[in-house]
Image (cartoon, helix red, strand yellow):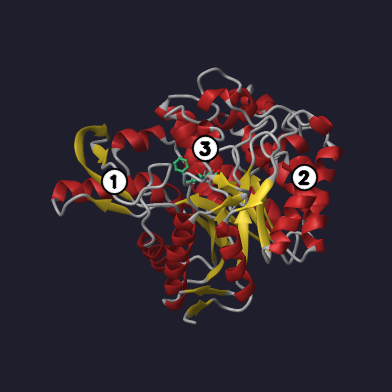
Amino acid sequence: MAELRFPDGFLWGTATASYQVEGAVREDGRGESIWDRFSHTPGKTFEGQTGDVACDHYHRYPEDVEHMARMGMNAYRFSVAWPRIFPEGKGPVNQKGLDFYRRLVDALQGRHIQPCLTLYHWDLPQALQEKGGWDNRDTGRYFAEYAHTLYQALGDRVPLWITLNEPWVAAILGHAFGQHAPGFGDFPLAMRVVHHLLLAHGWAVEAFRHDGPRRAQIGITLNLSPVEPATGKEADGQAADLADRFTNRLFLDPIFRGAYPELPDLMRSALPQATPEEMERISTPVDFLGVNYYTRQVVEADPQGLYGVGMVPARGDLTEMGWEVYPQGLYDLLIRVHREYHPQAVYVTENGAAFADEIQDGEVDDPRRIAYVREHLSRAHAAIGAGVPLKGYFYWSLMDNFEWAFGYSKRFGLLYVVPGSLERVWKRSARWYAQVAQANAVPL
Ligand SMILES: OC[C@@H]1[C@@H](O)[C@H](O)[C@@H](O)c2nc(CNc3ccccc3)cn21
């Protein structure tokens, strides 16, 4: 049978995030996070749904690790809930919180699954938000102390560390558009948060280099999308270039080039004046880049749009999120990042799709998800062939979970989570992905 073989040692994993799967939000000393506060605020999430229970992963993680092992996974990307380690964001360590992640890492190692630990996947301790959150530079200092605590506790057993998940989403959706926690609609605030998140990343990498685990590697995960103009018109090309600067390059350039991209005056003036020392810190070299790829953006010149940029509504093969299924975008993106930013290594830290999954007689047949993953993996394989140092792929997500403002209404998982019982049921895509991981090859 024709197949696409991946390099020996390629990582096959799935990804989750603490607030989306753990539940147990008041257990073992966990403090409140900004997502606890946001999801409990009326009108913010689908039907007022929250992560209070989520997938109850906090208690069911042994079963979940067993599912991963049966799938033949050799890696698992998860995030640590900062408020479990420091309920107030700083101060005394909550040992019971640390113990949960020690148990999780032990369970993964026991099944030869490499942990990939994300330090921040948006669940900032509410106590720090009350001191200004990411608008306060001190938060970045506390983040580095939190990171250092985890390096000491888990460093010799976690080979891959990610400082931040999608700082663009945390900054812009959380502080400019108000769709994510903490829910502000203040563009200048959002641009200060961009800079403070990057400083936090730099302080955490410096701490890692200074006395972190020797054999481990550290990077950052960015949400990246190829941006294409709607037409060949000059104005649309300029709109696409601006959208690319504001989404992709806003983080790629500081981290890999030590400078922000050229931006329109209004946008640029909202960024704090960065000193050379700060840009040096932000661009402390990383060992890898994590890429979260889901779809492309098509834009056009639109005088009514933000900064004259209009998003062209996606058409054609759409997921339940309304995102265009566009596998070629993964290839284009990986090639561009490789050629223009030269990361030492790249991982696809998220790629996946929500479809209208239905369970019938205990079965979930999801052919569109199988096609989605097969097509994206074929482009990832082509990128490797073109020289991109792609070392692994993490499907989003292991299981259906709390999809932020959409609550539980969007199912991305390979495992179907039954409402109420929270029973995990393998979708057909889980069995298909298991074959890929076990063969280290994609069947065509
Ligand atoms: O939406 C699916 C996942 C989400 O569950 C993850 O927590 C998050 O890391 C994630 N990022 C994207 C892509 N970026 C994005 C763009 C606009 C809004 C929200 C996320 C998708 N996803």
* Mark sitting on residue 170: 3
Q: Earlier in the sequence, mark 2 or mark 1?
A: 2
- Above or below, 193 against 208 in this view is above
> Is the residue marked 1 within 8 Å of ligand 1, measured from its CB?
no
Between residues 270 and 338, which one lies in front from this camera angle?
A: 338
Residue flagged by tag 3: what amino acid is it?
A: Ala
The answer to whether the residue labelled 1 contacts the one labelled 3, judged by CB atoms less than 8 Å apart, is no
Mark 1, residue position = 242
Residue with the most extreme bottom position? 1
Quarter of the figure with residue 403? top right
Q: Is residue 356 visible?
A: yes
Residue flagged by tag 2: what amino acid is it?
A: Arg
Q: Disc 1 or disc 3, which is closer to the eye?
A: 3
Label 1: element kind: helix
Q: CA distance from mark 2 to mark 1?
A: 45 Å
* Mark sitting on residue 60: 2
Q: Is residue 212 visible?
A: no
Residue flagged by tag 1: what amino acid is it?
A: Leu
Label 3: element kind: helix
